[in-house]
Image (cartoon, rainbow, N blue to C red):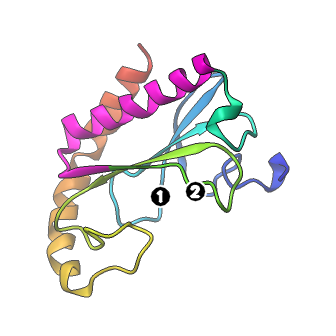
Amino acid sequence: MDTASCPLCTPPGDELLWQNAYFRVIRVDGTPHPGFTRVIWQDHIAEMTQLSATERDGLMDIVYMVEQVQRRVLRPDKINLAALGNQVPHLHWHVIPRWHSDSHFPNPIWCAADPAQITAWTAQRQEIEARLPEYYTALHHELDR
């Protein structure tokens, strides 16, 4: 896959939150899961083992930092970390805060939503979305250190 056709090189609609020479951290839009954040390795690499040990440690430090800020500010019941890459062979990690009342819990967010949970989730989701500006500010602060 070339850079021009890679959805992780030019993500449509997703907001770039932070980047350096190695990583990009983006807000994933168009999802019912507030705070869903993606950490992307800048170069086209498909597997973690293609990175040096130092590069892997650096990538995971960023993933753990995103998780830590989500836990502190958004206060989810659980965090899902996923590095699937089956459809896009470009190394990236999904950092997804989860709540017991979310429309997909306890299933993965890629499964169908549970209609019985949608009403309760809508109300809690609004409360969580109100904390997103604080989350993004705290994330910038941590990543700029």
- Relative to 16, is 117 on the left or the right? left
Q: Where is residue 4? Give x, y as percent.
A: 83, 51
From the viewer's perspective, is residue 74 above or below residue 85?
above
Identity of the residue drawn at 57% across and 26% down: 56
Q: Quadrant of residue 73?
A: top left
Q: Amino acid at mark 2?
A: Gly
Identity of the residue furthest to the bottom in this view? 115
Is residue 59 covered in magenta? Answer: yes
Question: Quick one: label 1 or label 2, which is nearer the N terminus?
Answer: 2
Q: Where is residue 125? Give x, y as percent.
A: 22, 63
State if disc 2 and disc 1 touch (CB < 8 Å): yes
Identity of the residue drawn at 39% across and 81% down: 112
Q: Where is residue 38? Give x, y as percent.
A: 50, 45
- Relative to 135, is 12 on the left or the right? right
Q: Where the C terminus falls, by quadrant?
A: top left
* Magenta segment, prevailing SS (helix, strand or loop): helix
Is disc 2 placed on a helix, strand or loop?
Answer: loop
Identify the residue position indicated by label 2 in the image. 13
Identity of the residue drawn at 73% across and 34% down: 43
From the viewer's perspective, is residue 5 above or below residue 68?
below
Q: Residues within 10 Å of mark 1 (few under 14, many from 20)?
A: some
The label number, if any, that marks residue 29 in the structure image: 1
Q: Where is residue 44? Give x, y as percent.
A: 75, 40
Q: Quadrant of residue 41?
A: top right
Q: Residues within 10 Å of mark 2 (few under 14, many from 20)?
A: few
Identity of the residue drawn at 25% across and 68% down: 106
The label number, if any, that marks residue 60 in the structure image: none
Q: Amino acid at mark 1?
A: Asp
Viewer-side residue, 144 vs 84: 84
Please give the range of residues in magenta: 53-79
Q: CA distance from mark 1 to mark 2?
A: 7 Å
Is disc 1 placed on a helix, strand or loop?
Answer: loop
